[in-house]
Image: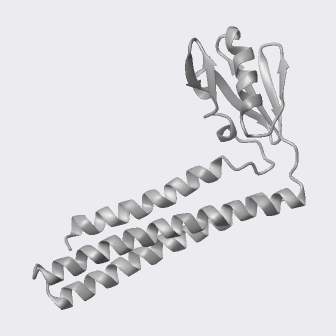
């Protein structure tokens, strides 16, 4: 297995972790974050547009998100889109801005969110293991076809295992950090 193939596997595993981390940003932690709303789709100007392309989004305090549309005519469309979204927040229209107050999470809701985090962590680990399996299959095929010797195949297998462990450890690290953020009161 060539160095470029090894780099490709490493990159695929890294993308699995990045995708998981991106998904974690949408999980509400009781603390305000622009990532909760920036990708809500708003029907404006006859098209579906992400909220972050229609308004400035800021977090002036830990439990509040402020959305300031660049064009006042889309204010009601943004409000409607937030109401239809699954974030579970009620928008407060205050003149030219929309304020979203983030209520503190209940203990039960925190436990539910931790379960969601663990489920997504497991999905990322499965994806990483699938990449390992694909690489191992390629390696076995190369060995069968006589492209590489058995010693080289064994060394490559060990390298693949090291990369796999490194990325599964990263999944655990990122997941534990998000779990701590959720459980923080």
Question: Which of the 4 quarters of the picture holds residue 101?
Answer: top right
Q: Is residue 103 shown above or below 131?
A: above
Q: Position of residue 49 (x, y in %)?
A: 56, 23
**Towards the viewer: 22 or 61:** 22
At horizontal 22% and vertical 84% (from top left) the residue drawn is: 153
Residue 99 as seen in the image, left or right of residue 38: right
Please give left or right for residue 70 compared with residue 86 in the image.
left
Lateral position of residue 185 relative to residue 172, left or right: right
Residue 115: x and y, percent? 73, 64
Residue 53, percent from left and from top: 57, 23
Visual colour scheme: one colour
For the image shown, how many numbered marks are present on the structure? 0
Residue at 59%, 71% (x, y): give it.
172
Q: Residue, x 75% and y 15% (percent of image)?
A: 76
Query: Residue 143 lies in what quarter of the image?
Result: bottom left
Residue 12 higher or lower than 134, as above or below: above
Residue 76 appears in view: yes
Residue situated furthest top in the rendering: 73
Q: Residue at x 73, y 15 (%)?
A: 75
**Quarter holding the N terminus?**
bottom left
Image height check: is 157 above or below 16?
A: below
Work out whether residue 185 can be spotted. Answer: no
Outermost residue on the bottom side: it is 151
Q: Quadrant of residue 156?
A: bottom left
**Residue 185 percent coordinates (x, y):** 86, 58
């Amino acid at each position: 297995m060539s160095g470029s193939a090894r780099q490709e596997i490493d990159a695929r595993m890294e993308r699995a972790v990045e995708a998981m981390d991106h998904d974690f940003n949408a999980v509400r932690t009781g603390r305000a974050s622009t990532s909760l709303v920036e990708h809500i789709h708003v029907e404006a100007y006859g098209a579906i547009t992400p909220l972050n392309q229609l308004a400035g989004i800021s977090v002036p305090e830990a439990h509040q998100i402020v959305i300031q549309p660049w064009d006042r005519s889309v204010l009601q469309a943004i409000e409607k889109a937030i109401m239809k979204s699954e974030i579970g927040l009620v928008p407060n229209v205050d003149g030219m801005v929309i304020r979203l107050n983030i209520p503190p999470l209940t203990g039960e809701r925190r436990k539910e969110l931790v379960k969601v985090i663990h489920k997504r962590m497991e999905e990322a680990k499965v994806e990483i293991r699938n990449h390992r399996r694909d690489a191992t299959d390629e390696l076995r095929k190369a060995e069968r076809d006589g492209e590489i010797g058995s010693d080289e195949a064994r060394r490559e297998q060990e390298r693949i295992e090291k990369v796999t462990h490194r990325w599964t450890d990263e999944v655990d690290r990122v997941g534990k950090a998000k779990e701590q953020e959720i459980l923080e009161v």
